[in-house]
Image (cartoon, rainbow, N blue to C red):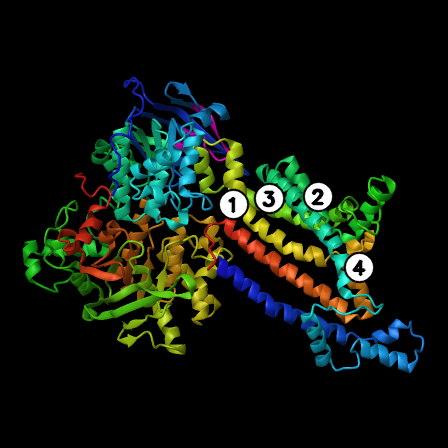
Amino acid sequence: MSNHAKDETVKPAAPRADDAPLLEIRDLAITFETSNGPVKAVRNAHLTIMPGETVAIVGESGSGKSTTALAAIGLLPSNGRVSAGRIIFDGEDIANASEKRIIELRGNSIGMVPQDPMSNLNPVWKIGFQVKETLKANGLAGANSKERVAEVLSEAGLPDAAARAKQYPHEFSGGMRQRALIAIGLACRPRLLIADEPTSALDVTVQRQILDHLDRMTTELGTAVLLITHDLGLAAERAEKLVVMYKGQVVESGPALEILRNPQHPYTQRLVNSAPSLASRRLQSQKAKDALAAAVAELDTPADADTAPDTAGATPADAGHAPSSIPAAAAKPPAASLDGQRKGAQAGETILEIKNLTKVFKLRGALGKSSDFKAVDDVSFSVPRGTTMAIVGESGSGKSTVAQMALSLLAPTEGSILFDGVEVNTLKGKALFDFRRRVQPIFQDPYGSLDPMFNIYRTIEEPLKIHRIGDAKSREKKVRELLDQVSMPASTMHRFPNELSGGQRQRIAIARALALNPDVIICDEAVSALDVLVQAQVLNLLNELQEDLGLTYLFITHDLAVVRQIADHVTVMQKGRVVEAASTDEVFSNPKQVYTQELLNAIPGATLLV
Amino acid sequence: MVMFTLRRFLQLVPVFFGATLLVYFLVFATPGDPIAALSGGKPMAPAVEAALRAQYNLDQPFWIQYGLYLKNLVTLNLGQTFSGQDVSAVIGRAYPVTARLAIMALAIEAVFGVLFGVIAGLRKGKLFDATVLVASLVVIAVPTFVLGFVLQLVIGVQLGWARPTVSGAAPWDELILPALVLGLVSLAYVIRLTRASISENMNADYVRTATAKGLSRPRVVVVHILRNSLIPVVTFLGADLGSLMGGAIVTEGIFNVPGVGNLLYKAIQKGESATVVAVVGILVIVFVVANLVVDLLYAWLDPRIRYV
């Protein structure tokens, strides 16, 4: 589709001396003026980018990676400034250059592809206008600017570019918007492109396409790329050199694979160990690990354990292997064996069963005509007690709609949801109220799902109060216990959500979900908004809680890397339908559907051999 | 779009009838006998009184009165005032004056409100911003009649820059001072609304992206911040046009402007249903049309909004 005019239109940037660095950042310090006095966001940062080279800055949010990159294009927020150090672009120090000089450089020497395609295009102007404006600002819009706009857009992989240019951003999908933003970033053939988390807001499969395309274009044009990402796997796959930032400082830098194989700094080591894209197997709780160790010690060979079912905690088939490889053919799905440990006699009992679930939404069309949209189409699966079922799919696959129906927040059009053998759809009054106690949600956005006007105590206590459990005193005790369970200090009780970090808030959301001792917790993208390290902590916590409390999880996510760590069974959804359902190991080692393979291939860093 | 506009015009029909019915009833239910008030409380010859009652249909029950009024309306006969003038003629004299006043007030609001609001929003926390904020707060806090009398005294009487009161023809230049008074409170709101909207949009991601493209600062402000920020302001201004026309009573009173406010006030006092209903009916139409224009402008400013 993106077959138009490649070689004629893509002209490489003017060749310069290849031995001089294109961008050199030395001893950079960036200070923000806040109401509590100056805060140093970046200290002693240094990095070098040669012409045509791709360098990635990796770090968690708040590490100063974006701030460092934005300083290079003079886009620090108004309260931030470069307080020390030099930013040398093509031999010129631009750290404190005049506004006029920076404006000259922006666009035609240094381009930018921003993070969130949804918010980075002005909603009130046509796409073509926003591209043309870039050309115009840099004196590149001649008489044939219309054709040029179409060219630039089709280079970025936008099909039917001339017609698309006349549309508004809201008529574009996320992936198309990001292509438009790439077109804008590269329109004036900059020598350096700053790509700030260019795909982290997109679906994995789209992510891969976009990154591949960006790779191809920048290679053809000879553009150097400064890639900013929190995903170590993605960085290692795309960049020749890595710069790892932590708390405003560069802790490690060097060739990508070297850092991945042999991280020196403790932070980098943690990052490498917890990168979800590099992790290869399901998490095990500490107890399960101990049980396994004991079992392995008792038995002569792991092979024996396989043939001796229901020996206490016998899952050595899974445990004995090196953690770096996916067990080629799992002798036994881990779910069954874990069940054995968790609930004894109840093992394998189905707690949640979805049968032929269908949801049809009416779409409003022109002139009062409405059309049907099947968001969920004949979906069936069942979740055994004490296990984790993951529903995986891209946005629009209907996975969240399934979650909402399972929570009885949305009525299905057809089909049934059986919870502990009882049809959920028909529940009313008291029975529905009881159902709500036993099935609890954790949502994606920990910023949005906690009431900002409630302190943490009130947040966690609220479900207890609604369900009239205990008196004030026993409720307080329960809240303390819950906070302890999610590893938060009891002093957190009197604080408000805005005083906590994203990971801490998600812990509070988990504590709130646990308050009513539910049987099932439905996690709708519960870790997607979190940084890798925090994500790993929360997944570990969820896993420990599952072990201790015998919880059942329905885990909705778009991220297969997360699935591998937490789920026993996987249901892959595409366009409302189930395309594949199997145990996690089967899906990862032997995906049957093309779509599942695509999803697997799209995990950044999946192909890296570390 | 055409369908939407048509539908909105159709909506005018029930709104118009509902409003006239309500207003007619309110005047009917107002205590006091309009005919007795006509003669200033002195006794009137029974025959004269009966004739007057018959002339204005005041001897009929409410529904008949209203029905007769509507019947006349169809033939574009708005009825007569108690002094025997055609209501249409009276309104024809008053409405242009008020329209001039309201349009000028709206222009003052729009131009200065957006201008000051933009500058304050772009320089948030600076001296200009602080001054404008305090000044607008004062204007909002002080009632219109106080502002009106103070400005009349200072500008009209002491400085002599403008006529303290307006002459019978009410030309544009004499209406500047009343228009300023009329628009002042809304001006303060427009400034605050624009300022908030600008300072919010300034931090939008697409503004940063626009800057990263290499655009000059003025272009970023005009093309990427201003248009997006005007959306809520336009809504406010449109809704305000209606209230400016109807709400000019105080201002018209202070500056003796022969406009709709004055006319309406006197007609209500006299219990002249025909005049009151006609004036209010036209105000309702102005209000609905102004809102329609706002909705259409809204769609033009924000392409995400499409009417079908």
CA neighbours of label 2 inside 10 A, class few (<14), some (14 to 19), many (20+) = few
Asked if the stretch drawn in magenta spans residue A80, the answer is yes
> In the rendering, at what x and y percent does residue B80 appear?
79, 69
Q: Which residue in the protein does label 1 denote? A: B228
Chain letter for mark 1, please: B
Q: Which residue in the protein does label 2 denote? A: B135
Residue B59 higher or lower than B263, as above or below: below
Residue A507 higher or lower than B22, as above or below: above
A542 vs B205, left or right, is: left
Q: Amino acid at mark 2?
A: Ala
Specify which label sits upstream in the sequence, 4 or 1.
1
A258 vs B185, left or right, is: left
Q: Which labelled disc corresponds to residue B262?
A: 4
The residue range painted magenta reads: A68-85
Mark 1 secondary-structure assignment: helix
Mark 2 secondary-structure assignment: helix
Disc 3 and disc 1: Cα gap in Å?
12 Å
Specify which label sits upstream in the sequence, 2 or 1.
2
Disc 3 and disc 2: Cα gap in Å?
14 Å
Specify which label sits upstream in the sequence, 3 or 1.
3
Specify which label sits upstream in the sequence, 4 or 2.
2
CA neighbours of label 3 inside 10 A, class few (<14), some (14 to 19), many (20+) = many
The answer to whether dots 3 and 2 both sit on one chain is yes
Residue B38 visible from this viewpoint: yes
Q: Which residue in the protein does label 3 denote? A: B195
Disc 2 and disc 1: Cα gap in Å?
26 Å
Q: Are marks 4 and 2 in contact (CB under 8 Å)?
A: no
The answer to whether dots 4 and 1 both sit on one chain is yes
State the residue at coordinates (31%, 67%).
A359
